[in-house]
Image: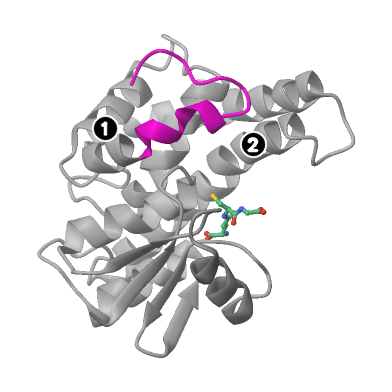
Amino acid sequence: MTLALYGHPFSSYTQKALIALYESGTDFEFRIIGPDTPAHVEDWIQRWPLRKFPMLLDDERQFTETSIIIEYLHLAHPGPVPLIPADPMAALAVRFMDRVFDLHVMDPVQLAVDTALGRYPMPPDEGRRMAAERLERAYGWLDSQMTARDWATGEAFTLADCAAAPALFYADWVHPIPPSCPALRAYRRRLLARPSIAPVVDEARPYRHLFPLGAPERD
Ligand SMILES: N[C@@H](CCC(=O)N[C@@H](CS)C(=O)NCC(=O)O)C(=O)O
């Protein structure tokens, strides 16, 4: 086994990388970062002092930042589904949507979560209110994009969908996608039913009590 992913099953960004690994069907070792695995924690911090996960190790090559991890998997361990299209303009559209999901969906989710964990000097309600405002804007735009698409940029599942799945999964817990965004709600359902994504959601199920805003009784 040469490929190892350091991360945690409940972490949204770890899930983004896991989905890409499951899509490509690549064998890998999942090195969980947690209190029961101090050797993994030590190895990860020593290799990546910025202390963000996931981290991918391929022999002695290491990669962090999930979009870069997935770009690397596409180059070095391609599977049946090309996660980056061969056509450069189509690839640009995929990279754009990947940025949208990370920066305009996942980022507000992290703001709400981090505020609830006391990482920002503001009351938890204020963090959640700010996140809801940003999410509401993102939901409206995304819904308009998804009306005629199965996946984030069209008919093919790509890097952008790997980003969308955990982002929309948790965003809906922070601030539910309203009925006025039916295409986006349907897209979230489609993502959760995908064979590479359903097991990722299941593997994270035992950790739902860790969600600081309270996990809903669904999904
Ligand atoms: N932009 C990074 C974000 C990674 C990230 O924020 N990971 C979270 C877990 S979901 C983390 O490392 N949190 C630990 C912390 O902030 O202390 C990526 O795409 O990999």
Q: Secondary structure at mark 2?
A: helix
Residue found at x 57% / y 19%: 214
Image quadrant in which the C terminus is located: top left
Q: Classify residue 116 by image quadrant.
A: top right
The image shows residue 180 at horizontal and vertical percentages of 44, 10
- Give the amino acid at mark 2: Pro
Q: Is residue 212 magenta?
A: yes
The image shows residue 40 at horizontal and vertical percentages of 49, 68
Q: Is residue 18 magenta?
A: no
Q: Is residue 162 left or right of residue 85?
A: right
| Mark found first going from the N terminus, 2 or 1 | 2
User: What separation in Å lies between label 2 and label 1 (alpha carbons)?
Assistant: 21 Å
Q: Is residue 99 left or right of residue 86?
A: right
The image shows residue 194 at horizontal and vertical percentages of 18, 39
Q: Classify residue 93 by image quadrant.
A: bottom left
Residue occupied by mark 1: 192
Q: Nearer the viewer, residue 216 or 148?
A: 216
The residue segment tinted magenta is: 204-219
Residue occupied by mark 2: 108
Label 2 CB, ligand 1: below 8 Å? no
Residue found at x 65% / y 30%: 134
| Label 1: few (<14), some (14–19) or many (≥20) C-alpha neighbours in 10 Å | many
Residue found at x 70% / y 23%: 128
